[in-house]
Amino acid sequence: MSHWTFASSPLLIIAAFLLGMLSVWFSYRIWTGNARSRQIMALEIFRLIIIIMLLITLLRPERIQTIQWAEEPAVVVLNDASGSMTTRDVIYTNQVVARQEWITSKLGTDALAPIQKTSRVVVDAFDAPPEQEKPEDVTNLIEGTDLNQALESALQRESNLKAVLVLTDGDWNLGDSPALAAAQYRNQSIPIFAVQVGRESPLPDVELSAVSAPAYGLMGEQISLPFHLHNRMQKDFKFKALLKDGEEIVAEKEVTLPAATDLQETIVWSPQQVGERNLTLEIPVQGDEALTDNNSAEFKVNVRMETLKVLVIDSYPRWEYRYLRNALERDPGVDMSCLLFHPQTGMGGGRDYLSSFPSSKDLIAPYDVIFLGDVGVGENGLSTEDVTLIRGLVEQQAGGLVLMPGRRGRHTTWLETPLEELIPVQFDTSRPEGIALQNEAQLALTRLGSGHWLTRFDISAERNAELWKQLPGFYWSTAVEKSRPGSEILAVHDSIRN
């Protein structure tokens, strides 16, 4: 069954009809005014045909064919399942629930019952994060909302599509613009309805999110526990973050959290008991928070009693070497070995001294940290094989390496060896002897260093800053040009700048 119609408004159809009649009248007057000539009549008839065809074209005639579908019409409900739908900002039954949870509850009720009486309802989730077989695949995972793909899939899958309902929390951020799919729907006269789920602005809340706790820590050593705070309120807060071992408060941290911002902080804990500790980090509920169950985080840290094995390598027994050796020797948690390449007297000997460098992987593997002083690569120093073993300890065992250049300038021989890529700065090779100072200088902590666990002598930030100011100064420093990309600067010379 089919019929013709015009895809124009009635007013336009009437105007076209009147214009056509007016053209007929003018043609008739022209014909009668020219003695009713046959040639004029033929010319006017031809002109009228052209005018009528133009008018019909402007009215956009359409042939409509009615097709009786044997298949029941379908209404597709597209449910956004992207990661952002887990955001909790929908108030439902006096509770704050996640966006996806609200959609699930609505779809589980009789909300779609009126539609199901006349159509087949298909609920389809789109853009759900794919399951990763390997944990390392998460780094390559791209999440987002591809509305265009979801709309096109529904159009291709359903042959008798009646309408589409989109339940989502935001605009598209993956794939092509959904306007492309919307144009196809418009051409087929299929309506698209969209319902926004969630708030445009976050609920007032202070959230304690991720706590980056290590798998284990050492008894008696300070363990840094970084944590992240989100302030979604328009005012500042000052409070104490409490670390609890069971019900006992074992550490606390004064926190100043600015309005409407994120903050990375660190709390330092010194465990006093061996074994697996069940810890809880808490922050107090602030004012009119909508969510009160995200102000704490529980985690576990295994506390071990272990001894750090340290190797100290130098040439002359300079002040830094003697100070470090005496400090490590008195520490019960450190098993120290020394290696002294004295340029005049040969290899150093005595208690805790090695006669030669650990020249195999099995011999160097037990060491956790190596202090490398003013020792070069070559004669009366380390060999290329030795520094290769040191690099392997750092790369393969995550061992620590502390570089301590000296006045002999032997650190320049580390360049163009396997050690070069481990050096965090670029040496000034034109001044291998370093920079001698007339006045005492000190190290100044950077913003990163003021809160870093490597530069923490005390849990209190104020007390830690005072301890750094009380440290003895120095009268010599290595000449460097700049830091290398990727390095983290924890402290700098208080007076010399590059």
Image (tube, rainbow, N blue to C red):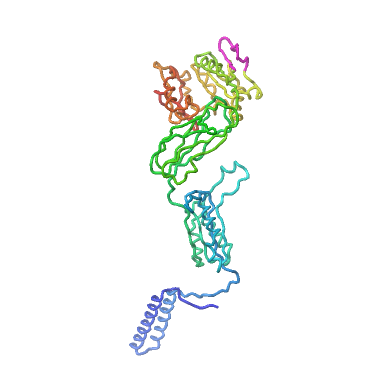
Residue furthest front in the image: 247
Establish if 73 lies above or below 298: below
Establish if 323 lies above or below 136: above
Which residue is at a point 34% across and 86% down the rendered structure image? 29
Q: Nearer the viewer, residue 381 or 300?
A: 300
Residue 496 pos. (x, y %)? 40, 23
- Is most of the magenta stretch helix, strand or loop? loop
Q: Nearer the viewer, residue 466 or 113?
A: 113
Q: Which residues are magenta?
A: 337-356
Residue furthest top in the image: 345
Is residue 143 rendered to the left or right of residue 35?
Answer: right
Residue furthest bottom in the image: 35
Residue 342 pos. (x, y %)? 56, 12
Q: Could you tell me which quadrant the N terminus lies in?
A: bottom right
Number of disc labels: 0
Residue 351 in magenta stretch: yes
Residue 494 pos. (x, y %)? 40, 23
Q: Nearer the viewer, residue 13 or 114?
A: 114
Residue 221 pos. (x, y %)? 54, 25
Which residue is at a point 63% across and 45% down the rendered structure image? 133
Is residue 73 rendered to the left or right of residue 286?
Answer: right
Establish if 464 lies above or below 193: above
Q: Could you tell me which quadrant the C terminus lies in?
A: top left
Residue 10 in magenta stretch: no
Establish if 454 lies above or below 85: above
Residue furthest left in the image: 33
